[in-house]
């Protein structure tokens, strides 16, 4: 189920259903970044380190500032 901006209900803070051990897709993480940070995602990268997946996004704000945002695929937390 996708919420506003295309982010899943789980990505918006609702935990996965019991027995559902899933992580965010790159598209879900990008939607989460757009919803929470704003601006335009201009680059996306997937980094796998062991069993941990992180998505790294380059975002350009409306005023032209460039920012790098990381998303933990398992928790949906932005860094």
Image (cartoon, grey):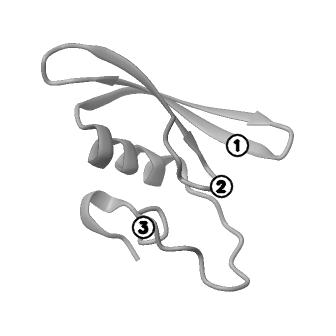
Q: Residue 10 carries which label?
A: none
Please state which of residues 74 and 48 is positioned toward the viewer in this rendering. 74
Circle 2 sits in a helix, a strand or a loop, which is it? Answer: loop
Q: Residues within 10 Å of mark 2 (few under 14, many from 20)?
A: some
Of the residues under marks 1 and 2, which one precedes in the sequence?
1
Alpha-carbon span between mark 1 and mark 2: 7 Å
Residue visible at 31% across and 45% down? 36
Vertical relation: 36 (above or below) 7 = above
Q: Name the residue under label 1.
A: 53
Left or right for 20, reference 29? right
Do the residues bearing badges 3 and 2 touch, measured as CB atoms within 8 Å?
no
Left or right for 33, reference 23? left
Of the residues under marks 3 and 2, which one precedes in the sequence?
3
Residue visible at 60% across and 56% down? 75
Residue visible at 53% across and 53% down? 76
Residue 22 is situated, as x and y percent measured from the top left of the image, at 66, 66
Alpha-carbon span between mark 3 and mark 1: 18 Å
Q: How crowded is mark 3: few (under 14 residues within 10 Å), some or many (20 or more)?
A: some
Alpha-carbon span between mark 3 and mark 2: 13 Å
Q: Residue 8 carries which label?
A: 3
Residue 79 is situated, as x and y percent measured from the top left of the image, at 51, 34
Q: Mark 2 points at which residue?
A: 74
Residue 54 is situated, as x and y percent measured from the top left of the image, at 64, 38
Do the residues bearing badges 1 and 2 touch, measured as CB atoms within 8 Å?
yes
């Amino acid at each position: 189920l996708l919420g506003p901006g295309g982010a899943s209900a789980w990505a918006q803070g609702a935990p996965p259903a019991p027995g559902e051990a899933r992580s965010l897709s790159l598209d879900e993480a990008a939607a989460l970044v757009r919803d929470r940070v704003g601006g335009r995602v201009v680059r996306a990268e997937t980094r796998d380190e062991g069993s941990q997946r992180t998505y790294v996004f380059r975002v350009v704000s409306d005023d032209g500032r460039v920012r790098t945002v990381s998303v933990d695929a398992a928790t949906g937390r932005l860094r």
